[in-house]
Image: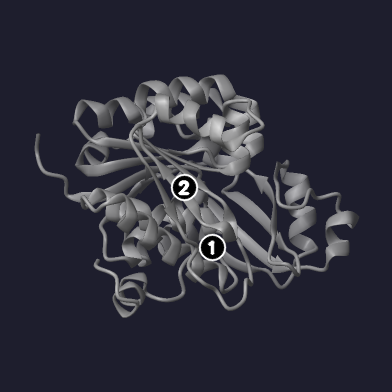
Amino acid sequence: MTSATYDVVAVGNAIIDLLQAVPDTFLAEENIERGGMTLIDEARADHLTARMPQAVVAAGGSAANTMTGVASFGGKAGYIGKVADDDLGARFTTEFRAAGVAYNTPPRSGPPGTARCLIAVSPDGQRSMSTYLGASTLLEPADLDADLIKAGETLFLEGYLFDRDEAKAAFVRAAEIARSAKRKVALTLSDKFCVDRHRDSFRHLVAGHVDVLFSNESEILSLYEESDLGAALEAARKACPTVIVTRSDIGSLIATRDETVEVQAFPVSKVVDTTGAGDQYAAGFLFAFSRGRSLAECGALASLAAAEVISHMGPRPEQNLRALALGSGFRV
């Protein structure tokens, strides 16, 4: 097996994020589910965009955010995701490359446009997302860069990409390519409603292709149709070598077949915006995991990255995570 030249390579939905702080009444007025992610059409996206004129605009997408975190730790990250040949697509490409991530997926000509995620951030820091998937779901197996995937120590797959058959096929093919090169495969379940839509497919993927599973408590309960976290975790650890369950300010659990590591949440003086918390947790974990660190070290860097991102608006680090980790006494 040839040595990896990238720490992590991700496949996901390439999306432009628009984030704006809103009063609680905004969610009721627009019938937006608090804390959830709802898929919307282009007309609805245009309407919400008009209602969020002061939005912070940034290249986003869950796995894309994770790759910028890996790069901020000093890791080498690559990304595969589809944008349109439009202004938002060009902005995504420029910002993403500027963050230090290798990104060369060709843009798609013609409609639909580049995907958008309208993120309403309520006063408690909770984010409620309305997502127009646009060109992002039109990723297909032919778009995969097999050489890039084989060059990554770990392949990271984003559950949100499962909403279209062609994208799902690309997803599974990417895992097969990584497996053929003896690489590790990680999956994030992304969202409880995503799990509800694709439970059987996710279970099959986890049992047959995944080495590291990222979830939060509601996602893992939904995946295994359990009401008790302990029971869901037992089911997961039988199917997957390493299972992570994030639990907000409680911290997180990292479970293997032989042990469970409890990770404390890194302290934050004020939660401003929880957008990207899970994405950056994954960044810290995958950076350390790809370099052979212990599960405790992986969890500690994951918690540090999550704490940084929830202390400000936006889904990506504002501080250099490598410098922050070194300043906090961590080994990177």
Mark 1–mark 2 distance (CA, rounded to whole Å): 22 Å
**Residue 253 disc label:** 2
Q: Amino acid at mark 2?
A: Leu
Determine the residue positioned at 73% across, 50% down.
Answer: 45
Determine the residue positioned at 66% across, 36% down.
Answer: 193
Rendered image quadrant of residue 177 = top left
Drawn side of residue 52 relative to residue 12, left or right: right
Rendered image quadrant of residue 199 = top right
Q: Is residue 98 above or below residue 93?
A: below
| Residue 110 at x, y percent in the picture | 55, 41
Numbered disc 1: secondary structure: loop
Drawn side of residue 136 relative to residue 49, left or right: left
Residue nearer the viewer, 42 or 254: 254
- The N terminus lies in quadrant: top left
Rendered image quadrant of residue 42 = top right
Image label count: 2
> Mark 2 or mark 1, which is nearer the start of the sequence?
2
Are discs 1 and 2 less than 8 Å apart at CB?
Answer: no
Residue nearer the viewer, 258 or 165: 258
Numbered disc 2: secondary structure: strand
Please identify, in this view, whether the residue under mark 1 or under mark 2 is nearer the observer: 2
- The C terminus lies in quadrant: bottom left
Q: Write down the residue under mark 1.
A: 315
**Residue 84 disc label:** none
Q: Residues within 10 Å of mark 1 (few under 14, many from 20)?
A: many
| Residue 258 at x, y percent in the picture | 33, 35
